[in-house]
Amino acid sequence: MQSELFSSENLVTPATAPGMTLQNAKSVKYVVDGECYARQGSMVAFRGNLQFEKQGQGVGKFLKRAVTGEGLALMAVRGQGEVWFAHEAQNCFIVDLAPGDSITLNGRNILCFDATLSYEIKVVKGAGMTGGGLFNSVFTGHGQLGVMCEGNPIVIPVSPQLPVFVDTDAVVGWSAALKTSLHRSQSVGSMIRGGSGEAVQLRLDGEGFVIVRPSEAKPTQSSNG
């Protein structure tokens, strides 16, 4: 049988070591030898001896996710084998965290991560009353993290001399050491008259980076919560 479908760029190669690699721009291949964690429903294929188990988040985290509509609905993947993760054909990226590194990410942008990493759902400081998109997951530890983004991400450096302002519906994540606050770019009179649709942004100060997607978030789906 002949077809471009079977070109080498589409064929799976044999696993060489545990951990995650990009299968292509839209999916992550994870060679499991023990345990990893992934977004619920993100498995598109697997082979080997693997079990998938819905993961609880603890009472506090569960309540926070229920109230905000955000958070990380996880499943644990255990055993030995290969599994492929993807979600709505979004672009996938792998972040390597070294000891001492930390990154905060919106729950909608997390695909999978090593069991050696730890995370905590936290309210974004200075933005606790503005909506569900400002409850993010902070990752620390040593390991890899699979991140996804609808479209090509925009990574903007942040410096003490040049803070960055981002749309709260477009932000993917940022360096966890950055200071966050809310910024209002419209006058009250302008908002009463209908406004520009860009009334409030998240301000980031310090030294690091912020990642945004090239579109605002879609309405929250039940699969995200």
Image (cartoon, rainbow, N blue to C red):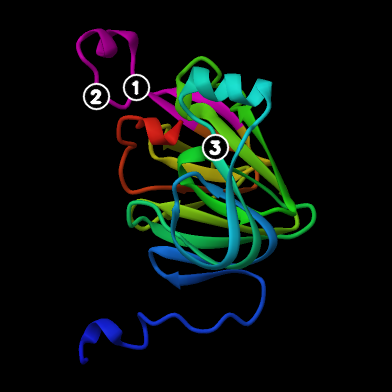
Residue 199, label in figure? 1
Give the camera-side residue of 10 and 124.
10
Residue 79, horizontal then vertical, whole percent: 66, 61
Q: Which residue is drawn at 29% across and 85% down?
A: 6
Give the camera-side residue of 178 and 67.
67
Classify mark 2: helix, strand or loop.
loop
Residue 126, horizontal then vertical, whole percent: 59, 21
Image position of 60 with respect to 106: above or below: above
Label located before the other in sequence (3 or 2) = 3
Q: Tell me which amino acid carries mark 3.
A: Leu
Q: How crowded is mark 3: few (under 14 residues within 10 Å), some or many (20 or more)?
A: many
Q: Identify the magenta region.
A: 180-202
Q: Residue at x 51, y 28 (%)?
A: 134
Image position of 72 with respect to 213: above or below: above
Image position of 52 with respect to 127: above or below: below
Q: Do the residues labelled 1 and 2 touch (CB within 8 Å)?
A: yes
| Foreground: disc 3 or disc 2 | 3
Q: Tell me which amino acid carries mark 2.
A: Ser
Q: Residue at x 59, y 60 (%)?
A: 50
Image quadrant assignment for residue 131: top left
Q: Tell me which amino acid carries mark 1.
A: Ala
Residue 196, label in figure? 2
- Compute the Cα span from label 3 to label 2: 31 Å
- Compute the Cα span from label 1 to label 3: 27 Å
Q: How crowded is mark 2: few (under 14 residues within 10 Å), some or many (20 or more)?
A: few
Residue 72, label in figure? 3
